[in-house]
Amino acid sequence: MQPRWQWRLEDEPGTALDRPTSPVFEARFDAEQWLGEHWRTLAAQGVCRAVLRHEGVPVPPAIPIPRVDPPPAA
Protein backbone atom coordinates (compact mmCIF):
# COMPACT_ATOMS: atom_id res chain seq x y z
CA MET A 1 0.00 0.00 0.00
CA GLN A 2 1.25 3.47 -0.91
CA PRO A 3 1.56 6.24 1.69
CA ARG A 4 -1.39 8.60 1.67
CA TRP A 5 -1.05 12.35 2.05
CA GLN A 6 -3.89 14.85 2.35
CA TRP A 7 -4.33 18.47 3.39
CA ARG A 8 -6.61 19.49 6.24
CA LEU A 9 -7.91 22.88 5.16
CA GLU A 10 -8.81 25.23 8.02
CA ASP A 11 -10.48 28.58 8.59
CA GLU A 12 -9.03 31.35 10.80
CA PRO A 13 -10.00 29.77 14.16
CA GLY A 14 -8.50 26.44 13.03
CA THR A 15 -11.74 24.61 12.28
CA ALA A 16 -11.51 22.06 9.48
CA LEU A 17 -13.54 23.07 6.44
CA ASP A 18 -15.78 20.53 4.76
CA ARG A 19 -15.51 22.48 1.47
CA PRO A 20 -13.17 22.84 -0.31
CA THR A 21 -11.46 19.50 0.16
CA SER A 22 -8.02 18.19 -0.65
CA PRO A 23 -7.41 15.24 -2.93
CA VAL A 24 -5.46 12.29 -1.50
CA PHE A 25 -1.91 11.90 -2.81
CA GLU A 26 0.52 8.98 -2.90
CA ALA A 27 3.57 11.23 -2.52
CA ARG A 28 4.29 14.21 -0.28
CA PHE A 29 5.82 16.05 -3.24
CA ASP A 30 2.52 15.79 -5.15
CA ALA A 31 0.56 17.12 -2.17
CA GLU A 32 2.92 20.08 -1.78
CA GLN A 33 2.84 20.80 -5.50
CA TRP A 34 -0.98 20.78 -5.49
CA LEU A 35 -1.08 23.30 -2.63
CA GLY A 36 1.42 25.52 -4.45
CA GLU A 37 -0.75 25.50 -7.56
CA HIS A 38 -4.11 26.01 -5.81
CA TRP A 39 -3.46 28.28 -2.81
CA ARG A 40 -5.04 31.36 -4.44
CA THR A 41 -8.27 29.50 -5.18
CA LEU A 42 -8.28 28.04 -1.67
CA ALA A 43 -7.72 31.49 -0.13
CA ALA A 44 -10.66 32.86 -2.13
CA GLN A 45 -12.79 30.05 -0.65
CA GLY A 46 -11.92 30.98 2.94
CA VAL A 47 -8.98 28.67 3.65
CA CYS A 48 -6.53 30.34 6.07
CA ARG A 49 -4.24 27.41 6.87
CA ALA A 50 -3.36 23.99 5.49
CA VAL A 51 -2.08 21.12 7.62
CA LEU A 52 -0.49 18.21 5.79
CA ARG A 53 -1.57 14.83 7.11
CA HIS A 54 0.20 11.53 6.49
CA GLU A 55 -2.04 8.54 7.07
CA GLY A 56 -4.24 10.84 9.19
CA VAL A 57 -1.38 12.13 11.39
CA PRO A 58 -0.56 15.87 11.17
CA VAL A 59 2.88 16.73 9.79
CA PRO A 60 4.00 20.12 11.18
CA PRO A 61 4.23 22.94 10.48
CA ALA A 62 0.85 24.23 9.34
CA ILE A 63 1.09 26.32 6.17
CA PRO A 64 -0.56 29.75 6.34
CA ILE A 65 -2.54 30.64 3.22
CA PRO A 66 -2.15 34.36 2.42
CA ARG A 67 -5.31 36.36 1.88
CA VAL A 68 -6.07 37.24 -1.69
CA ASP A 69 -7.51 40.68 -2.39
CA PRO A 70 -10.14 40.78 -5.11
CA PRO A 71 -9.00 42.40 -8.36
CA PRO A 72 -9.85 46.10 -8.67
CA ALA A 73 -13.09 46.89 -10.48
CA ALA A 74 -12.52 47.98 -14.05
Image (spheres, rainbow, N blue to C red):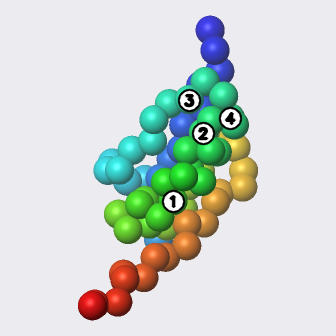
Residue 73 percent location from the top left of the image: 28, 90
Q: Which residue is mark 3?
A: 25
Q: Would you say 33 lies left or right of 8 here?
A: right
Callout 4 amino acid: Arg
- For label 1, the crowd category at 10 Å Cα-Cα, with few meaning under 14, some 14 to 19 and many 20 or more, is many
Q: Nearer the viewer, residue 72 or 49?
A: 72
Q: Would you say 5 lies left or right of 9 here?
A: right
- For label 4, the crowd category at 10 Å Cα-Cα, with few meaning under 14, some 14 to 19 and many 20 or more, is some
**Contact (CB < 8 A) between labels 2 and 3?**
yes
Q: Which residue is mark 2?
A: 31
| C-alpha separation, residue under disc 4 versus residue under disc 2 | 5 Å
Q: Would you say 70 lies left or right of 62 here?
A: left
Callout 1 amino acid: Trp
**Element at label 2:** helix
Residue most extreme to the front? 74
Q: Which residue is mark 1?
A: 39
Callout 2 amino acid: Ala
Q: Would you say 60 lies left or right of 74 here?
A: right
Q: Quadrant of residue 74?
A: bottom left
Residue at image position (45%, 42%) is 22
Sequence-earlier tag: 1 or 4: 4
Sequence-earlier tag: 2 or 1: 2
**Element at label 3:** strand
Q: Nearer the viewer, residue 34 or 23?
A: 34
| Badge number at residue 69 | none
- For label 2, the crowd category at 10 Å Cα-Cα, with few meaning under 14, some 14 to 19 and many 20 or more, is many
Residue 51 percent location from the top left of the image: 59, 51
**Contact (CB < 8 A) between labels 3 and 4?**
yes
State whether residue 12 is above or below residue 71: above
| C-alpha separation, residue under disc 2 versus residue under disc 3 | 6 Å
| Badge number at residue 28 | 4
